[in-house]
Amino acid sequence: MNPSHLAARPAGTNRPIELVIFDCDGVLVDTERLAIRLQVALGAELGWPLTADEVVERFIGRSKESIVGQIAERLGAQTAGLWWSRLIQRHRDAVDLGLDPVDGLPEALAALTLPTCVASSGSHEKMRHTLGRTGLYDFFAGRIYSASEVPRGKPAPDLFLHAARRMGVDPAACAVVEDSGPGVAAARAAGMRAFGYAGGPTPAEHLEGPDTVVFDCMRELPALLAGA
């Protein structure tokens, strides 16, 4: 893929980047394919057959509240609660069997000189587990933000604006690295530059849009940020 897809920027976003905000699942840790498999299996068990593409469309990048809400609307609150509890336990068990950083991510982090933080739809407990399992937690410790801290999850801009405030950086000077449609939409809504990682299960066309660079090799990220 040509990583030069950059649409015209809105006024005020051509200033130098001062902060890189990373999503967690699918950007730092290689968990999205695992989550999709688990969601498909749970749907088959609990009465909502879903394809992998449907899981990507409905669930990937969204908060717990959004996912549980969709399941409850379809199957009722009790089944939604059961679905979520099984998902959390199975996800933890699978991660404990082995989890890697996203391919090329360690090299990208080593080459970055800009300040960084994490802002994810996942809970702090989940991020402590996945980032800890991959040796990344200490790198980001003290700079990790969860959708549980804000009123609205992605695609609303709340989480990224919260991260920028906590880091003391103007949103117009922030870049967001995301791998989901709701994630890049949230970055754009926050007035931030979006870098859509298309090396995972989300199709590149779901990431494209205004003020967004789409790329599929994480090792390219430092050069893309430097050229933004």
Image: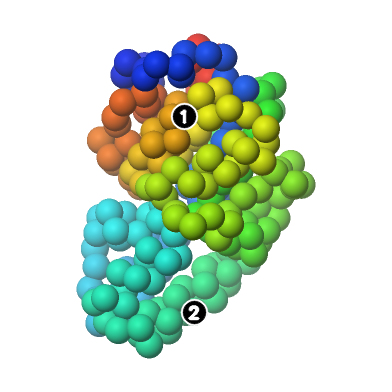
Q: How many marks?
A: 2
Residue tagged 1: 192
Residue tagged 2: 85
Please state which amino acid type lies under the numbered disc 1: Met
Q: Is residue 9 above or below residue 99?
A: above
Quadrant location, the N terminus: top left
The circle drawn on residue 128 is none
Local packing at callout 2 (Cα closer than 10 Å; few below 14, some 14-19, many 20+) is few
- Residue 29 image point, x, y percent: 56, 48
Residue located at (37% from left, 19% from top): 10
In this rendering, position of residue 53 left or right of residue 32: left
**Mark 2: secondary structure:** helix
- Residue 8 image point, x, y percent: 32, 16
Residue located at (37% from left, 26% from top): 212
Of badges 1 and 2, nearer the viewer stands 1
Q: Are marks 1 and 2 in contact (CB under 8 Å)?
A: no
Residue located at (57% from left, 72% from top): 93
Nearer the observer, 75 or 157: 157
Q: Is residue 127 above or below residue 2?
A: below
**Mark 1: secondary structure:** loop
Mark 1 or mark 2: whose residue is earlier in sequence: 2
Q: Is residue 219 visible?
A: no
Please state which amino acid type lies under the numbered disc 2: Ser
Residue located at (62% from left, 22% from top): 18
- Residue 118 image point, x, y percent: 61, 43
* Residue 5, quarter of picture: top left
